[in-house]
Image (cartoon, rainbow, N blue to C red):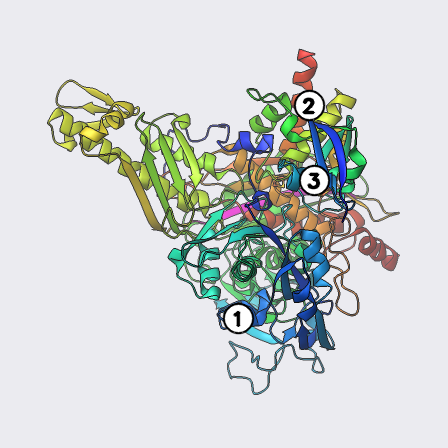
Amino acid sequence: MSEAQDFKYIGQRTIRPDGHDKVTGRANYAADLTLPGMIWGKILRSPHAHAVINSIDTSKAEEDPEVFAVMTHADIPNQTASGVQNILAKDKVFYHGHAVAAVAAVTESAAERALGLIEVDYKILKPVMSIDEAISNDSPLLHDDLFTKGMAEDPAVPSNISSRNELSKGDLEVGFAEAEVIVEREFRTATVHQGYIEPHACTVRYDEDGQSMIWCSTQGHFAVRATTASMLGIEQTNLNVIASEIGGGFGGKLPIYLEPVALVLSKKSGRPIKMQMDRNEVFMASGPGSATRNWVKIGAKKDGTITAMKAKLCYEAGWAPGSSPLGPACMTVFTPYDVDHQYVEGYEVVVNKARCAAYRAPGAPQSEYACEMVINELADELGIDPIDLRLKNVAKEGTQTMYGPKLKAVGLVECLEAAKSSEQYKTALKDNQGRGVASGFWFNVGGESSVVINMNEDGTGTIVEGSPDIGGSRASMQMMAAEELQMPVEAFSAIIGDTQNLPYSNPTGGSRTTFATGMAVVEAAADVVSQLKERAAATWNVVPEHVDWKNGAAINTKGEGVLTAAEICGSAAKTGGHISGRGNISARGASPSFAVHLADIEVDPDTGKTTVLRYTAIQDAGKAIHPSYVEGQYQGGSAQGIGWALNEEYVYNEDGRLENPGFLDYRIPLASDLPMIDTIIVEVPNSFHPFGVRGIGETGIIPPLAACGTAVSKAIGIRMSELPMSPPKILKAIHDAS
Amino acid sequence: MAKTHVTTTINGDLKEFLCEPGDTLLQVLRDELGLTGTKEGCGSGDCGACSVLINDRLVCSCLVLGVETNGDVIETVEGIGDSDKLHVIQEKFLEHAALQCGICTPGLVVSTKALLEENPNPTEEEARYYLAGNLCRCTGYDKIIKAVLDAAETMRESA
Ligand code: FES
Ligand code: FES
């Protein structure tokens, strides 16, 4: 489909089916399950950022009467499973907070106390805490067997640079030779955290003879099963993972931290185990998004035609090579621009920080921040409106990307035009106020989704999907099933199946759920429709081709007769058995979503304090299934991006210890920090989805960095480059300039 | 360790429990009494997910000890609204799509109730500052504030 369609249910603002439980406190999240006989597990974490583990003595803890089990790395059955050294450190700790040992005890406080009985002998090493340190010649090495991947020639000596990437199109020399104005600048961004409010937690029960179970908060319970089963050396069929309600993830609940430990403790103790991270453990040992150092150079003709774009990106991986989002960072950096000559090279370095995890549009916010800041500076140099400069060079259908495909129909032009005619863009600013505009691009992914729709005897249906619902996606599934079956939304409930109820589904991530799982729902619903038509045909003694499906009922086109879903399902036992529809797909055609944001910020020149006065987020949704939750994604992404731009950062001391592992000092935006966030939903349909959907969850975190960065720079009349642009940094810039 | 016997009224019911001196009210509610609607986001008074009312006063239950609550009247999210009908605040949160993951929602529902009892007609700014102790990472607060102001208006009209 490519033309706008008429919809009966899609596009409405229905009440989400899981909403009642969530406003009454009935919904069960990761830490809410208690099992009979359950005891508590806790993890001992390294106080050092970089150290060799000489020995671990657990004997005192094991003798404690309240302790049921103690474990270290040596107790993980499969020592070669991927990621196993982050679960519990083997012979070296690589960051402050690295898990070293675990205990299970009768209560949480007993477990906490017992951690103090474990004696670990460390040989402390000098930590490597920044990109600059990591790549300097006299830097200590984290891994003496790490040789940079992706170099033209294999390096002879190990280093802290784990990989190099390169992408290009056209010829930079030609491009820069055509340029009349060139702007280049380097930018830095700090280590940040996804900041979900629900800490990681799980409740597990190991069963020697039957099926073990894990209840946990995760973006992908099938991935939890695969990883945990592999670490424990058990068959997947003997492990059932139940996805609890999830209290935010943003990429940070893709990795696995507690589950294998809890299951081993359960096996050792013979008891169900609950584990939950404290907030400081969440900050220390989960999450973070890469700190970066990115340099961008862009050349243009005086009329605003951009002729060449070049970038050099450097991303921290944390301690584990391959954990940064360097690949997508390189792929996304220049995609909003249809420019013939583009080049990017990227480096990933390892540092003594927690292993990086995906964070909403992983890699893109930092690299696109650098590009968008330079574009805005270029607009100033050229004396061209920043939206007009973008429109002049805009990526559109047919634009060749650096990373491979040509773009299909996308909505960036429409977003830019909507920004230009928005209320906010027309309002005048006062002294000490600045405005920033920035674009954002994210690919979105498709992937594997499994869905079953079970039709009940009264004609209602239960949608069983494999994608944890983090932001209201059950409502969209209901609406898409309703649209396909032409039955009211209320005729469907939507639940997240356990790993034993459905085949594999990819995690909720990559903005894929409403797109890919939505496609699976539509396929399952179509399967239901065709079975309902067959049953009606058999009842009427006609061929199924002579049956139509309209308004939730079968119609005999060769005679008289209407049979509703309720009538067909009610007599299904007599016509061949009960009905369920299936949609097990590997979805392709997830089309990109572009966004444009506007930020107006006032800076108090005496304190450096910033106030976001007004904010507008504009983004292409393809088709908004449930507009309220689409707006919600735009607003939530904006808020996270604003936090990233203005306040959020990990602060380490000189020993590499994280000094602000709490919400008091790692300050995410509060209600009092933000204005209303206006939204404009642009809809340029994605022809690969039956209803035109594009993923929309991630793009919204990208533009705020440069929109806010530019607004602050304009408000104080000084070009800022380092994030976060927190009050002390702004104040220093003002003082340095005067 | 010797446990202390505590008697409270929670959501209108008389509740007795035993707790250790160090147990927070949050731990008692969740682990002893099975009232898991009250959430833990930080355990240090910074996120508001654990908000409850004690004698009509809004507090973070992670900062109150169980033993301190003897004789107190406590209201948690489970006590808001009737069993067959949601409270206006809850209805407005749903109507405005003021929750995404929903982990902050119980705390916000409780805090909003306290806000509107103190100030039935808050401005947007008053609502934002009153609710500044309730972190939400998903929504950007826009729809939450709209739900709160709409609930306030509806409650004023029916008062
Ligand atoms: S859990 Fe009490 S304020 Fe966060
Ligand atoms: S809805 Fe997720 S934290 Fe508020």
The residue range painted magenta reads: A591-602
Q: How many C-alpha atoms fall within 10 Å of the one at disc 2: few (<14), some, or many (≥20)?
A: few
Query: Which kind of residue does numbered mark 1 sit on?
Result: Asn
Q: Which residue occupies 47% across, 28% down? A: A12
Query: Which kind of residue does numbered mark 2 sit on?
Result: Gly
Q: How many C-alpha atoms fall within 10 Å of the one at disc 1: few (<14), some, or many (≥20)?
A: some
> Which residue is disc 2 drawn over?
B12
3 and 1 marks on the same chain = no
Q: Quadrant of residue A58?
A: bottom right
Query: Which kind of residue does numbered mark 3 sit on?
Result: Val
Secondary structure beneath dot 2 equals: loop
Residue A25 sits above or below residue A718 on the image: above
> Which residue is disc 3 drawn over?
B28
Q: Quadrant of residue A129?
A: bottom right
Q: Which residue occupies 72% across, 73% down? A: A127
Residue A239 sits above or below residue A524 on the image: below
Q: Which mark is residue A165?
A: 1
The residue lying toward the viewer, choosing from A245 and A556, is A245
Earlier sequence position, callout 3 versus callout 2: 2
